[in-house]
DNA sequence: TATGAATGAGTTTTCATTCAT
DNA sequence: AATGAATGAAAACTCATTCAT
């Protein structure tokens, strides 16, 4: 085979991108290292030159995804103009999208196969994003925008609940019912945070800000 | 090897019990059929005499678990005396316990490995238990006990969110903080359902009604 | 299960009949002892009470089939009225039918799967039927009906060749071409045996004298 | 274990050669992939790196064998000098040898086990070689060398019959009787094709042109 | 005679990982 | 940096046969 040398960073990225797509399509266990390298057109050994193991590759992919989300959330977090409610909504949106954007992959995605990955991604996200959301909630409480004495717990419950909820419905449901679901999500958030009726809308959620993700 | 014959019912139960423990300890993928039969002391073939596949075994275990929960939930469901709030709380408790009781296994449980199983169990439960909870919510709404226009959505979100929340905290947390978490859960439920302050308590949640479960 | 006791002969026959059908449908290797007993509705152990092994069962089935053919061939053999040519034709017919009558099974038969069985049956048949055919050939030669100096060899070659030929064509071919094939077979036999043009016809070959056979 | 790397072509050939010998000795079903790799001294995985399955390996071996025969038959087929009778005899020889050369393996060969393989090989051969033989027969007929109105049928019957005949006798028979058998085969062919007495001889047939084959 | 649960050796196949080049 | 042949330890599953009842 022709031997194409790339700089490590580039090769690593190529492998991660390819693997991410395959993991999303077929699931992690069901994707073999051979699948990944075959699709790229490099040798099996090349993979192990760049990554310690398939497991570590997954971790890096997951972290990269979380970082991407974090980046956007930090922007929101640091925005001085936004109300707490605005921020919360923005963060939630980012969080959902992180776990639910399959973009053009949508059709192949095997719900079953991906539950585990979705789960892992959510867990990782929670650890890093959760605290930021909690901070906003606290901020909102102190500003009188929100009203809750369980900011951490509430954040976590809603983050999980909503994320799962969306994960389960976003592709199955006919579009007409999606609106109602999103309104329900808003309603839940408002009530749980003790916010006034929001003017901000979660809609539309269809945009894909991450490219093909898990 | 000495050949010990049991009636199928008994042997199947033995295999299911043993497997359930192993799945909880090491995870499903990580437990081989060989592990299961070795622990029982029967031949590999015995397993396949009683179960079609490892996958089917898992399904049966999961169904058994769900059935166990269903049974208790039906009791609540059919109770004429309880208020909607009482019923909801009772159902939630059962639902949590279903997914979170590891009893004496608690210490070995490999959180990571079990996420997938927990997930599957929750999904199965939702399908069967969810509709009952929704009915109660609707009943509560019509009685004026609750106030929500999204009974289905709210039920699902909270069921997932709370279940995950508990799954993640019940063993890690020091006991002193558990109380606060449960209160938070109650608070979330009240608000989301639009209920008045409940007098019913979720506490205590520690009891194990199912034996060693996933 | 209800325990139905039959006299051994009857039970053996039942097992052989059932197995014969299954072997014809799915092939020998592909039919498990479990398949056989399931179809009859007896226990696994019952099989081994009556037969030493699956292999031995096959042998008995094959022998039974050959015996059936032998019986008919002996009639021909001992017929004082028939010419050698008549006898040969009659014997060939019996031999073909032995290996090629699947009767109503025709449609399921997996050519591939059954080659091995057909082969074995032919071999067994040759050993027992071959010598009788050879005798007739010799008789024909001495009577001046036939003309060959290789009666044994010729018998064997033609028996094999024709049997295979028919095995390969009898179900695939459209009926219109079968006539030509049979005429070709006759032609081959006449020439090889050095017979005059026969007045006897192999046609029709479709009759099934054995029931469902291999 | 010491790791010896070979180029795929070489390794594949090594595996095919080894498997061919084992299949011939013990039969296909009775030879496990483990047997093959053990004999070569490579890992189980090496086998599956080079072949998709044991079944596919057999196919490749069979095809290789047929190709070998085809190659020689094409030479004959395209020879402008030879008479039709010469060609037929040459082709038959090749065809026999293809199916019957076990070379030095002769002694181990388990007749029983190999019937199925021989069968498969013959079938494959017939499909590819048969048509060439038929063409020659037709050519012979139009040249007035042969005389038959069933060129296809006759070819097939004789090809099968003779091949089986030889398969069954070549190793069992004492050499002294082989000559007679071959003369019988010639006689059958002459008669069936309606040829004049041939001057060409099938003898000698003992030469092994293929090495150890099935 | 019959039952049917149990046996256990054996099979093919997969795949993450290694390593000589 | 890259190659790709080789590794080898699993794994799930099959099935003819056995045997206590």
Image (cartoon, coloured by chain):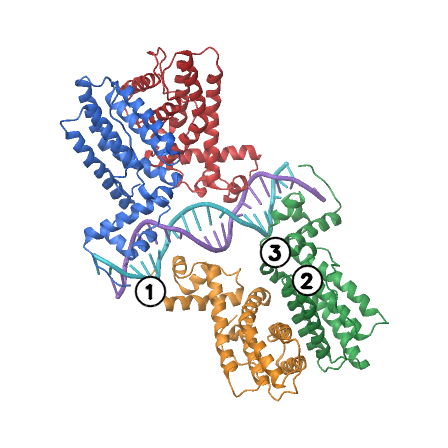
Chain colours: A blue, B red, C green, D orange, E purple, F cyan
Residue carrying label 3:
C28
Residue carrying label 2:
C100
Q: Is residue D147 left or right of residue B190?
A: right
- Other residues around mark 3 within 10 Å, as few (<14) / some (14–19) / many (≥20): some
Chain to which the residue tagged by mark 2 belongs: C
Chain to which the residue tagged by mark 1 belongs: D
In this figure, what is the number of numbered marks?
Answer: 3
Residue carrying label 1:
D4
Q: Position of residue E2 (x, y in %)?
A: 69, 42
Q: Mark 1–mark 3 contact, CB under 8 Å?
A: no
Secondary structure under badge 3? loop
- Other residues around mark 2 within 10 Å, as few (<14) / some (14–19) / many (≥20): many
Say which label, 3 or 2, has the lower sequence index: 3
Q: In this view, which residue lies farthest toward the left?
A: A80
Q: Is residue A26 above or below residue B92?
A: below
Q: Do circles 1 and 3 both sit on a common chain?
A: no
The one nearer the camera, B120 or B112, is B120
Q: Position of residue C191 (x, y in %)?
A: 71, 79
Residue C188 seen in this snapshot: yes
Q: Position of residue B73 (x, y in %)?
A: 46, 21
The one nearer the camera, E19 or A85, is A85
The one nearer the camera, D169 or B75, is B75
- Other residues around mark 1 within 10 Å, as few (<14) / some (14–19) / many (≥20): few
Q: Mark 1–mark 2 contact, CB under 8 Å?
A: no
Residue beneath the point at 35% across and 38% down: A116
The mark closer to the camera, 3 or 2, is: 2
């Amino acid at each position: 085979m022709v031997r194409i040398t790339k700089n490590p960073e580039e090769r690593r990225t190529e492998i991660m991108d390819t693997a991410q797509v395959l993991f999303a399509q077929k699931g992690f266990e069901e994707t073999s290292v051979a699948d990944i390298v075959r699709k790229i057109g490099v040798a099996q050994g090349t993979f192990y030159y760049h990554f310690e193991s398939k497991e570590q590759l997954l971790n890096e992919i997951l972290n990269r995804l979380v970082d991407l989300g974090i980046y956007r959330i930090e922007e929101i977090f640091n925005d001085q103009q936004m109300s707490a409610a605005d921020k919360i909504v923005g963060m939630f949106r980012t969080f959902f999208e992180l776990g639910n954007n399959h973009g053009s992959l949508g059709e192949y995605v095997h719900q079953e196969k991906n539950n585990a990955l979705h789960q892992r991604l959510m867990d990782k996200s929670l650890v890093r994003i959760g605290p930021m959301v909690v901070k906003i909630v606290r901020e909102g409480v102190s500003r009188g925008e929100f009203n809750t004495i369980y900011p951490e717990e509430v954040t976590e419950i809603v983050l999980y609940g909503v994320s799962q909820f969306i994960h389960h419905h976003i592709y199955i449901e006919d579009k007409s019912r999606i609106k109602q679901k999103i309104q329900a999500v808003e309603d839940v958030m408002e009530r749980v945070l003790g916010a006034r009726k929001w003017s901000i809308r979660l809609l539309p959620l269809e945009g894909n800000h991450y490219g093909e993700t898990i």
